[in-house]
Image: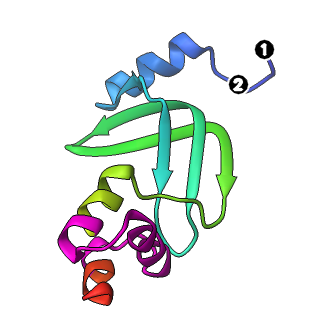
Amino acid sequence: MMPGSLDPKKMQKMMKQMGMEPKQIDAEEVVIRGKDNYVVKNPQVTLIEMKGKKTFQVMGDVQEGKKEIYSDEDIETVSDKADVSEEEAKKALEETDGDIADAIMKLK
């Protein structure tokens, strides 16, 4: 242990005294959508609750960029509502950054 660093058990005890309760979350993938999209594969996710607020700490293999963030269900929804093929629905979702409502409006 390095000088000045805390023993993990002491750290957990201190966090509990401050009202913080860390909890491991079992997750297969974490997706962060925004101007830049991030997909975290094999994530280690810790949920920390303090004073009614929830904070997530995420570590794992990060993939950046414009990945397909929408699901097959999203494609099917757009396809059904706009009465177009799944390929057209997928293209519309790509053009609208996965926004289902915008994709449907674009196709009508």
Q: Identify which amino acid the numbered label 1 is placed on.
A: Met
Whole-Å distance between the Cαs marked 1 and 2? 7 Å
Residue 66: x and y, percent?
61, 67
Q: Main secondary structure of the magenta part?
A: helix
Say whether marks 1 and 2 touch (CB < 8 Å). Answer: yes
**What residue range appears in magenta?**
79-101
Residue for badge 2: 5
Q: Residue drawn at (44%, 67%), measured in percent from left and top? A: 90
Question: Looking at the image, how many numbered discs can be counted on the residues?
Answer: 2
The C terminus appears in which quarter of the rendering?
bottom left
Image-quadrant location for residue 98: bottom left
Would you place residue 28 above or below residue 100 in this image? Answer: above
* Residue 16 placement (x, y as % from top left): 34, 22
Q: Kindly identify which numbered label has been placed on residue 1.
A: 1
Please give the label number shown on residue 79.
Answer: none
* Relative side of 79 to 33, left or right: left
Q: Which residue is located at x 70 percent, y 25 percent?
A: 5
Disc 2 packing (10 Å; few <14; some 14–19; many ≥20): few
Amino acid type at image mark 2: Ser
Q: Residue furthest right?
A: 2
| Residue beneath the point at 59% across and 60% down | 67
The crowd level at tag 1 (other Cα within 10 Å; few <14, some 14-19, many 20+) is few
> Quarter of the image containing the N terminus?
top right
Secondary structure under tag 2 reads: loop
Q: Is residue 27 above or below residue 97?
A: above
Of residues 105 and 80, the one nearer the viewer is 80
Residue 68, image x, y percentages:
53, 59
